[in-house]
């Protein structure tokens, strides 16, 4: 029977900080996709506007779309600001790792999210070397 996959729990706070960058990237990407959708929606509404404008007095149509875009833009600014701070922190953390192999491994796995096998291949490490470096990284050695 195949060996069950173990869930790796990372205890090293610096490595967790590196991983946080990926989560912020995903949040920004999601928000940018929503912004694109809202812009396309606004373009379609603009194309459908006629000389007769309804006076419902409530939010709807373009007003709603503009409000959504303003909200998205504000959230996007905040996320990018947070991302920029986190990237600066990640670079400081990586700069403190003196061993170039460990630094490259940390960048590939925890910052870039590269799969273990791909990281091993890119660094030209055997499985044993890879596991040793990873254990040392996670232990903060």
Image: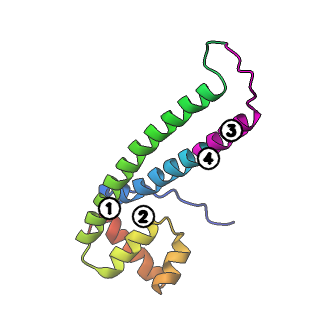
Question: x, y (%) of residue 71?
Answer: 49, 33
Q: Which mark is residue 111?
A: 2
Q: CA distance from mark 3 to mark 1?
A: 37 Å
Question: Which type of secondary structure does the marked residue at label 2 adopt?
Answer: helix
Q: Which mark is residue 41?
A: 3
- What are the residue bounds of the magenta stretch? 35-55
Circles 1 and 2: CB atoms closer than 8 Å: yes
Tell whether position 64 is magenta. Answer: no
Pick the residue in front: 59 or 47.
Answer: 47
Q: Residue at x 52, y 83 (%)?
A: 121
The chief SS type of the magenta part is: helix
Q: Which residue is mark 4?
A: 36
Which of pointers 3 and 1 indicates the residue nearer the eye? 3
Q: Nearer the viewer, residue 119 or 54?
A: 54
Disc number placed over residue 10 in the picture, else none: none
Secondary structure of the residue carrying numbered label 3: helix
Q: Residue at x 34, y 76 (%)?
A: 102
At label 4, counting other C-alpha atoms closer than 10 Å, the crowd grade (few under 14, some 14-19, many 20 or more) is: few
Answer left or right for 31 relative to 140.
right
Placement of 48 over or under 125, stated as above or below: above
Mark sitting earlier along the chain (3/1): 3
Q: Say which of marks 3 and 2 sits in front.
A: 3
The residue lying at 28 percent from left, 58 percent from top is 89
- Image mark for residue 90: 1
């Amino acid at each position: 029977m195949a060996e069950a996959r173990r869930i790796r729990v990372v205890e090293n706070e610096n490595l967790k900080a590196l991983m946080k960058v990926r989560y912020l990237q995903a949040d920004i990407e999601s928000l940018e996709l929503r912004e694109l959708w809202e812009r396309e929606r606004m373009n379609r509404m603009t194309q459908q506007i006629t000389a007769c404008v309804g006076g419902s007095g409530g939010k709807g149509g373009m007003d709603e779309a503009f409000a959504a875009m303003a909200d998205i833009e504000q959230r996007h600014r905040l996320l990018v600001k947070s991302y920029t701070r986190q990237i600066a922190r990640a670079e400081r953390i990586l700069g403190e790792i003196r061993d170039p192999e460990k630094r490259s491994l940390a960048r590939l796995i925890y910052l870039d999210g590269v799969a273990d096998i791909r990281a091993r291949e890119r660094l030209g490490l055997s499985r044993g070397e890879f596991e040793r470096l990873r254990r040392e990284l996670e232990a903060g050695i």
